[in-house]
Amino acid sequence: MEVILLLGAPGSGKGTIAQQLTQRNPSMRHVSTGDLLREAVALGTPAGREAEPIMKRGELVSDKLIGDMIRDFLKKGDPSASYLLDGFPRNKAQAERLDAILCECNVPLRAAVLLDVPEAILLDRITGRRVCPVCKTIFHIQTRPPKTDGICDVCCAKLIQRPDDQPETVRHRLAIYRDATADLIKIYSDRSLLLTLNGDGAPSEIAEAFLKLLA
Ligand code: AMP
């Protein structure tokens, strides 16, 4: 087992690139902390109940809650997998927590890959995003509209906008991201683990560039 960090702002395409990577490389698995938390909210677990109001406000859940979730996940993980960790760490304290978790689980950190995308593009991508609450397919009102307005092409459910994808909440999330990421960039570049990729382009090309960078 090894861990590769996916760093990048909300909307930088981490999920899309991870999907491309896992299709190309079967040992790679995508772990999104946002997805783990949304699943916990949907299931109504104690962690989910604690996280729900915080996520609705676009704020970060506590380092303890998310750290425990990642540790439990890795402890049950597949020893032959390369985990693409998306959404954690998000600040210096979480980076320190991750080091402790990886040490406890005896898992190496292979690289931290930063997907770099201009902020105007990020705002547009996120506020136009619509998701299917049933099958999780993601649409965009301009770049990937559903065939029928507001309805999922795959399962016909009514599409929703995630509460934390509203414009005001997104601006807040981007501001939190900016403040915290500067620290992470320094931490991983000081350890020669940081790889930077231009994230404004075709997902398949970005995924290829990603794999070349890691090779
Ligand atoms: P995401 O899908 O990565 O944009 O995450 C959605 C929400 O989940 C964030 O706005 C936070 O409220 C919460 N979240 C995800 N990852 C973390 C993390 N590492 N630390 C704290 N909160 C997180």
Image: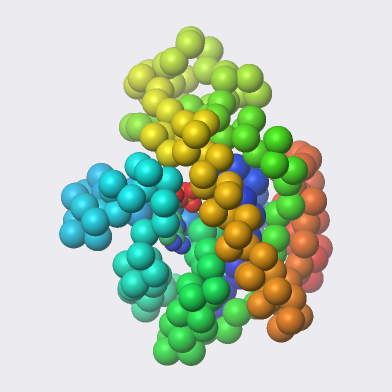
Ligand 1 sits in which quadrant?
Answer: bottom left
Residue farthest top in this picture: 148
Q: Which quarter of the figure is the C terminus placed in?
A: bottom right
Image position of 68 (left or right of 60) = left
Q: Looking at the image, which is closer to me, 62 or 72?
A: 62
> Could you say where residue 52 lies in the image, as x and y percent from the top left?
28, 48
Quarter of the figure with residue 64: bottom left
In the image, what residue occupies the spot 65% across and 23% down? Answer: 143
Q: Looking at the image, which is closer to me, 195 or 214?
A: 195
Q: Please say whether residue 69 is visible from this viewpoint.
A: no
Quarter of the figure with residue 51: bottom left
Quarter of the figure with residue 50: bottom left
In the image, what residue occupies the spot 19% across and 56% down? Answer: 45
Image position of 57 (left or right of 141) = left
Looking at the image, residue 113 lies above or below residue 135:
below
> Could you say where residue 7 lies in the image, as x and y percent from the top left?
63, 60
In the image, what residue occupies the spot 56% across and 40% down? Answer: 171
Looking at the image, residue 70 lies above or below residue 119:
below
> Could you say where residue 211 lies in the image, as x and y percent from the top left?
75, 61
In the image, what residue occupies the spot 79% across and 46% down? Answer: 205
Image position of 113 (left or right of 148) = right
> Could you say where residue 94 lies in the image, as x and y percent from the top left?
48, 73
Judging from the image, the colouring scheme is rainbow
Q: Please say whether residue 186 is visible from this viewpoint.
A: yes
Q: How many labels, in total?
A: 0
Image position of 201 (left or right of 176) = right
Q: Looking at the image, which is closer to me, 151 or 128?
A: 128
